[in-house]
């Protein structure tokens, strides 16, 4: 692995979403690819992820990588997330709902996924002047639970302060993309989310 630095605006780190492990990995690879261009990206930029790149970075078989990319076309396009930002005119906090990608395609003959980030995502991975979190891809590459990756990101965002804030259980569940109907008992939440 090269210098696979993942950098996200803290608004994206603290966003509420539910992505499967393979979908999170593809988003992370796309963020790295966007950084590697050195020229920045726009909401028209097509980023390419090759199956062999996915396989080597996440230590999976080429077959598993091909399947991950093919399945992403169906699933990732439908995925949504919500994040908070300050409204420019009122200076009040608002909740924005967005898709991750505006375009996605799998080129079968090349085993390549083409991703175009949605307009709301682009500034959250490119304009990182003040409030951002960064980490090396290898720090999450071996995590196999979708919740583990999200937990890592939520905790690493507070690395520089040396402490984590208290988070209300409802907000915690929301950030992890856990619906109100899932893991309602604390024992279930611990077993299925925290102890994986």
Image: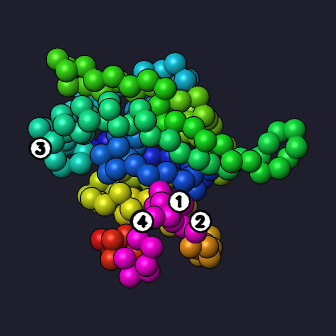
Residue 106 among magenta residues: no
Query: Which dot marks residue 61?
Result: 3
Choose mark 3 or mark 2, whichever is in front. 2
Residue 182 point in image, percent of width and height: 42, 65
Residue shown at 59%/47% (left/top)? 82
Residue 52 point in image, percent of width and height: 19, 34
Choose mark 2 or mark 4, whichever is in front. 4
Is there a contact, CB below 8 Å, between mark 2 and mark 1? yes
The residues bearing labels 3 and 4 have C-alpha atoms spaced at a distance of: 31 Å
Question: Which tag, 2 or 4, sits closer to the chain's start?
Answer: 2
**As rendered, which of 41 and 170 lies closer to the eye?**
170
Per the image, the residue denoted by label 4 is: 182
The residues bearing labels 2 and 4 have C-alpha atoms spaced at a distance of: 14 Å
Q: Is 193 drawn above or below residue 145 in the view shown?
A: below
Magenta region: which residues?
Answer: 170-188
Question: Which tag, 1 or 4, sits closer to the chain's start?
Answer: 1
- Image side of residue 15 versus residue 4, left or right: right
Residue shown at 40%/49% (left/top)? 19
Q: Secondary structure at mark 3?
A: loop
The residues bearing labels 3 and 1 have C-alpha atoms spaced at a distance of: 30 Å
Residue 56 point in image, percent of width and height: 19, 42
Choose mark 1 or mark 4, whichever is in front. 4
Q: Residues within 10 Å of mark 2 (few under 14, many from 20)?
A: few
Question: Which tag, 3 or 2, sits closer to the chain's start?
Answer: 3
């Amino acid at each position: 692995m090269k210098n696979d630095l993942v950098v996200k605006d803290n608004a994206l780190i603290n966003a509420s979403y539910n992505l499967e492990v393979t979908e999170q990995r593809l988003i992370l690879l796309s963020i790295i690819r966007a950084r590697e261009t050195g020229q920045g990206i726009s909401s028209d930029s097509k980023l390419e992820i090759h199956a062999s790149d996915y396989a080597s970075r996440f230590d999976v078989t080429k077959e598993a990588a091909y399947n991950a990319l093919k399945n992403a076309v169906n699933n990732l396009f439908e995925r949504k997330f919500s994040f908070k930002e300050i409204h420019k005119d009122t200076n009040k906090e608002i909740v924005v709902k967005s898709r991750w990608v505006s375009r996605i395609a799998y080129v079968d003959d090349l085993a390549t996924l083409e991703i175009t980030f949605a307009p709301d995502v682009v500034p959250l991975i490119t304009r990182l002047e003040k409030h951002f979190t960064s980490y090396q891809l290898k720090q999450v590459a071996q995590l196999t639970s979708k919740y583990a990756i999200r937990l890592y990101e939520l905790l690493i965002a507070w690395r520089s302060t040396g402490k984590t804030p208290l988070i209300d259980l409802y907000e915690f569940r929301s950030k992890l993309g856990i619906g109100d109907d899932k893991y309602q008992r604390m024992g279930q939440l611990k077993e299925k989310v925290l102890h994986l």
